[in-house]
């Protein structure tokens, strides 16, 4: 079965109600754009045969056409795909955050979450919705990959690959979201709880925290495997009390506070708007920093001694910083 049919079936299946308020890749429409583009380029090539020299084998030199940009795709294709990827990423982040961090919700959403806990098995509901979210992000990511591959094939170019690189730079690469790591950590934590046989789906996620390069592995299929580093880029150790910055990079809270020149007890949200991510150097990413609670629980359960040692060290440093801060405030206020 072709992927286009598979994707259409996915949109019509049980996910229809779930996808009601979620964006998705307009796969068929984008393929129609490429089909029209293919017809236009064939017409251009036919007109060019009258002006281009034909080689000995009778083939046409297409270099001129390969180097030209396609106005149709420049105006419609990449702009539309960027918009769709941005909406999908935003929807996925908001849904995962609401699912795994309900305490961050306000007003009616928080009230409904607490009411649901009184009448339903909340963990089972979270597992089911998380699975839908994983299907949602995976299918859309594959759709984008397929359509970009089709783009390069039709245009005999590498612009599709360049677009993927640009998506990573703009934090729109769907399968590189830190919230996918948080969702994976949730499923690994669930496997360690008393909910019975986890099933084949849960085996998609695994992690190795004992290796010199701690990582989480997500296996979508036998040929599609993604690895996510769980190493803090500052201390070069397994992330402890991890926070995801607005750019998507993960750091220990203490390391991120140090990089942003703020104290531990002040928190990352007090960082200056000019403070930059230590990895990508993007400014203003600390205001939206989020604590990865499921990933922190995973490290706590899998590396208990390491987690306790790091907790003691962080508390000691926090007390030290607090003491120095208030002493300096006293000197400033009273002069002694």
Image (tube, rainbow, N blue to C red):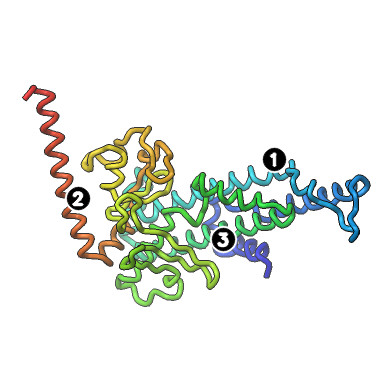
Looking at this view, name the residue that lies furthest to the left: 336
- Residue 66, position as x, y percentages in the image: 76, 49
Asked whether, in this view, residue 89 is left or right of residue 264, the answer is right
Looking at the image, residue 287 lies above or below residue 30: above
Asked whether, in this view, residue 101 is left or right of residue 140, the answer is left
- Residue 327, position as x, y percentages in the image: 10, 32
CB under 8 Å between callouts 1 and 2?
A: no
Q: Work out which quarter of the rendered image holds the N terminus and state it.
A: bottom right
Looking at the image, residue 240 lies above or below residue 106: below
* SS label for mark 2: helix
* SS label for mark 1: helix
Specify the label residue 139 is tagged with: 3
Specify the label residue 75 is tagged with: 1
Which one is earlier in the sequence, the residue at label 1 or at label 2?
1
* Residue at mark 1 to residue at mark 2: CA–CA distance: 51 Å
Looking at the rendered image, the disc whose residue lies closer to the viewer, 1 or 3, is 1
Which one is earlier in the sequence, the residue at label 2 or at label 3?
3
Instruction: Give the residue displayed 8% in from the left and 22% down from the top.
Output: 335
Evaluate whether residue 111 shows in this view: no
Specify the label residue 314 is tagged with: 2
* Residue at mark 2 to residue at mark 3: CA–CA distance: 40 Å
């Amino acid at each position: 079965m072709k992927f286009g049919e598979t994707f259409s079936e996915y949109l019509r299946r049980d996910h229809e109600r779930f996808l009601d308020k979620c964006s998705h890749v307009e796969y068929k429409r984008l393929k129609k754009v490429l089909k029209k583009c293919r017809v236009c380029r064939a017409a251009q090539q036919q007109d060019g045969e009258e002006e281009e020299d034909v080689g000995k084998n009778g083939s046409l030199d297409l270099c001129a056409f390969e180097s030209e940009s396609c106005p149709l795709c420049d105006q419609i294709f990449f702009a539309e795909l960027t918009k769709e990827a941005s909406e999908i990423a935003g929807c996925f982040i908001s849904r995962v955050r609401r699912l795994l961090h309900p305490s961050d919700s306000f007003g009616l959403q928080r009230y409904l979450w607490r009411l649901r806990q009184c009448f339903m098995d909340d963990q089972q509901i979270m597992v089911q919705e998380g699975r839908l979210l994983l299907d949602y992000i995976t299918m859309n990511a594959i759709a984008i990959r397929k359509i970009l591959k089709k783009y390069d094939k039709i245009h005999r170019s590498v612009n599709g690959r360049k677009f993927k690189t640009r998506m990573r730079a703009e934090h729109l690469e769907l399968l590189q979201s830190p919230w996918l790591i948080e969702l994976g950590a949730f499923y690994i934590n669930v496997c360690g709880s008393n909910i019975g046989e986890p099933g084949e789906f849960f085996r998609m996620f695994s992690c190795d925290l004992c290796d010199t390069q701690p990582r989480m592995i997500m296996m979508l299929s036998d040929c599609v495997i993604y690895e996510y580093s769980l190493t803090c880029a500052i201390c070069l150790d397994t992330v402890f009390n991890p926070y995801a910055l607005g750019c998507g990079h993960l750091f220990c809270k203490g390391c991120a506070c140090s990089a942003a020149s703020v104290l531990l007890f002040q928190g990352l949200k007090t960082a200056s708007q000019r403070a930059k991510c230590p990895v990508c150097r993007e400014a203003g990413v600390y205001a939206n920093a989020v604590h990865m609670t499921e990933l922190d629980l995973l490290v706590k359960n899998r590396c208990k001694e390491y987690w306790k040692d790091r907790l003691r060290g962080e508390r000691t440093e926090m007390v030290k910083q607090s003491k120095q801060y208030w002493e300096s405030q006293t000197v400033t206020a009273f002069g002694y």
